[in-house]
Amino acid sequence: MDPVFKQAHSIATNYISQISSRNVAPTLEALNALNHFDIDLPSNSTEPQSILHELEVFGSPATVATTGSRYFGFVVGGSLPVALAANWITAAWDQNAAMRVVSPISAKLEDVCLKWIIDVIGLPKETGGGFVTGASMANLTALAAAREAVLARQGWNVKAQGLFGAPSITVVVSDEVHSTVLKALSILGLGFERVVRVPTDSEGRMISEKLPNLDANTIVCLQAGNVNTGSFDPIDSVCKKAKEAGAWVHVDGAFGLWAAACSSKQYLTKGLEHADSWAVDCHKWLNTPYDCAVALVKDPVHLRSAMTINAPYLVMGSEREPSQYVPEFSRRARAVEVWAALKYLGKSGLDNLIERTCSYALAFSVGLKKQGFLVHNDVVLNQVLVSFGGSEKTKAVIQAIQQEGTLWCSGTTWHGITAMRISVSSWATTQEDVDLCIKVITEIARRVI
Ligand SMILES: *Cc1c(COP(=O)(O)O)cnc(C)c1O
C-alpha cells in the first residue's frame, strides 16, 4: 500500500486528538505562515510525503477548530466520529453518485436516508429528494421545483420556454429571510427585490396576519430556525392560508428542521408536513462532515421534472436515479456519511443531540444573565444573543474572546443592538465546556472596557 495513506491517517488522527487543547481560532503566527503556499506552480513533481507534511505543518494550524467542543460561531456543527470515518471510507471508494450504475451503494444509501429523514422529521411518505452541497443548494433545488410546479399549473413549461413571457409568480418571504434564499431566488430568475416581504415580530418570526393575499401563482418561503434567535415562522397558520389559496410553501430549515426530530422541540415545527418543499443541512446540526444537505419535495414529480437530465450515453434505470433530483451530475457520495450519522444516533440519539445542544444554549443564557449580561432572545432552540454593554464594548469583548482562544463566537446586529451570537450545534460540546466558557466570557467582559 502507498505509504501516503498511513501518513495521512497519522496526521488526521493527531489533529483530532489535539483539537480540544488548541486555540479555537488559528494564531496570528499560523495565519502568517500561510504565505508558505504562495509559490508558482512547480515545473516538476513533488514527493507525496513532503506534500502531506506541508499540510500538517502549515495547514492544520491554520484551520478553525470547528470540530472541537467550543466553537459556537455561525451555525456550523461538528463531525460525529462515525460520520467522519464513513467519509474517509467514501473518499477511498471515490464513487460518482450520479447514476445507480456508477455507484449502487450510493444510490441505495440515498434511498434509505431519504426514507429515514422523511420518517424522523415527520414529512409525508410520498416526499422525494436529493443530496446537495448545503442548504443554499437545497433551497435553490426545492425552489426550482416550486417554480416548475407553479408555472406548469398555468400551462407554462419553464424548462423549455424559460421565464421570458412566462406568467408572473409572486414570491413571499419574511423580513428575516435567509440571504441564501434570496440568492436562490435571484439565480432562478425570480428576483430578490421583487419579493413581497412580510414583517416579523421581536423574535424574527413572520407575522402571519400580515401575509398578503395568496393565490395559486404564489410561492411562500418560510424559515424554521432563525440564524440569530433560533425562532420559527408560524408554519401551521401560514400553511393553512397557503393551502386554501393553492400557493406553494417552501421551508428553509437549514438547521432548525431537525427540531422536528426532538420531542421537546417538535412544537416549533407544527404544521411542517403541510408545506410543499423543505431544505435541511446535514453538515450543521446532524454533525456530518461538509458538504452535505438534502432538498425535499412533497410531490417528487416536480423535482424530477425540474432536474431532468437525459443523453443517449447515460444509463438511467427504472429505480430512482440520483442525478434526476439534483442540479449536479457527477458528485461525491455524501449520503454515506448521512447514513452513518443517522444509524449511529438512531431516533433517540438524534432527539438527544438536539435536546442536549438546546439545553446548553439555555445554560449559556441563564449563566450569562446571572453574571449581569443581557440576553436579547427568547432561547427556544440552540441560539443565544448576548451583549456586554454598548455596541463598542460588545464588539471589543467579542474580539477579545476570539483572540483568547478558549472558544469562538461571532457578532451580529439584532434589532439595532450589537450582540454576540452563541450557536450550540456540535455533538462534542459538554456541560464542562459550557461552564468553562461562561467563566472565560465573564472574565473577558469584566476586563475589557
Ligand atoms: C446556514 C443556513 C443556510 C445556508 O446553508 P449552507 O449549508 O451554508 O448553504 C440557509 N438558511 C439558514 C436558515 C441557515 O442557517
Image (tube, rainbow, N blue to C red):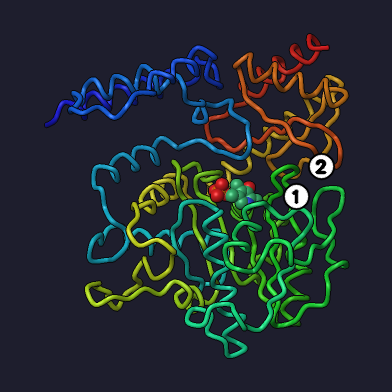
Task: Name the residue rendered at 82%, 62% in the picture.
Answer: 198
Q: Nearer the viewer, residue 284 or 41?
A: 41
> 101 left or right of 246?
left
Residue 69 drawn at (x, y percent) = 55, 26
Q: Secondary structure at mark 2?
A: loop
How far, Cα to Cα, is label 2 from label 1? Answer: 8 Å
Q: Secondary structure at mark 1?
A: loop
Give the labeled residue for mark 1.
231
Q: Residues within 10 Å of mark 1 (few under 14, many from 20)?
A: many
User: Is 289 drawn above or below residue 266 in the view shown?
Assistant: above
Give the labeled residue for mark 2.
378
Q: Residues within 10 Å of mark 2 (few under 14, many from 20)?
A: some
User: Is 183 drawn above or below residue 208 in the view shown?
Assistant: above
Looking at numbered disc 2 in the image, what kind of residue is underneath it? Asp
Quick check: can you spot residue 383? yes
Quick check: can you spot residue 255? no
Residue 271 drawn at (x, y percent) = 70, 67
First along the sequence among labels 2 and 1: 1
Determine contact: label 2, label 1, CB under 8 Å: yes
Task: Name the residue rendered at 81%, 42% in the picture.
Answer: 378
Locate the C terminus and report the quarter of the image it occupies: top right
Q: Nearer the viewer, residue 74 or 355?
A: 74
Q: Residue furthest bottom?
A: 155
Looking at numbered disc 1 in the image, what kind of residue is underneath it? Ser
Q: Nearer the viewer, residue 20 or 265?
A: 20
Q: Residue furthest top?
A: 447
Task: Name the residue rendered at 16%, 26% in the picture.
Answer: 3
> 309 left or right of 419?
left
Residue 143 drawn at (x, y percent) = 58, 67
> 387 left or right of 252?
right
Locate the N terminus and report the quarter of the image it occupies: top left
